[in-house]
Image (spheres, rainbow, N blue to C red):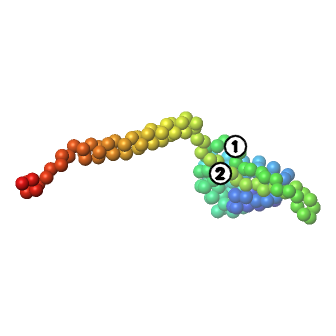
Amino acid sequence: MFRNMVTSLFKYERIKTTDVKAKELRRWADRLITLAKRGDLHARRQALAIMREEAVVHKLFEEVLEKFSASSGGYTRITKIGTRPGDAAPVSIIELITPEPIKKKKDKKLKDKAEEKTTKKSEKIPKSASESKDSATVKEPDTESPSQTE
């Protein structure tokens, strides 16, 4: 049963099941992602022994590996959604999470300072350009053509 469930989890990236099964399925999924992170032939064959579809194993070793190569755990999320109408069993959704890249606080501060400098420079440029236009109009003497002065 868990072999089918873990295959479906990697195929659809989200499935709905009971809470107890979801908690156990998390262990299976973490083990398979760890195998995918190893990436050698023996790990692929071990994954094929557990999962039922070759295409899903290929997806695991190619796509999922790229998502989780930086993280060392926490590959799945279990969200409780209520109870099942027939037998009132607690039901939850288990899904693969996509980790977001970690942003450093220093980078934000540096980017903010750089943006402030560019805005200050952009504010200064129009002022200096307008000053040069004003000075250009002042510097030009009114020259009349010789025919008009005669």
- Of tags 2 and 1, the one toward the viewer is 2
**Residue 147 horizontal/vertical position (percent):** 8, 57
Q: In screen coordinates, is 140 left or right of 107?
A: left
> Which residue lies at the image location 81% right of the left edge and 50% below the top edge?
23
Label 1 crowding class (10 Å Cα cut-off): few <14, some 14-19, many 20+?
few
* Res. 16 image quadrant: bottom right
Q: Return the disc, 2 or 1, that comes first in the chain's sequence.
A: 1
**Residue 128 horizontal/vertical position (percent):** 34, 42
Number of marks present in the image shown: 2
Element under disc 1: loop
Of 117 and 20, which appears nearest the observer?
117
Q: Residue furthest front?
A: 150
Q: In screen coordinates, is 53 left or right of 16?
A: left
Residue at the spot of label 2: 98
Q: Quadrant of the C terminus?
A: bottom left
Q: Which label belongs to residue 73?
A: 1
Q: Which label belongs to residue 109?
A: none
Q: Residue furthest right?
A: 87
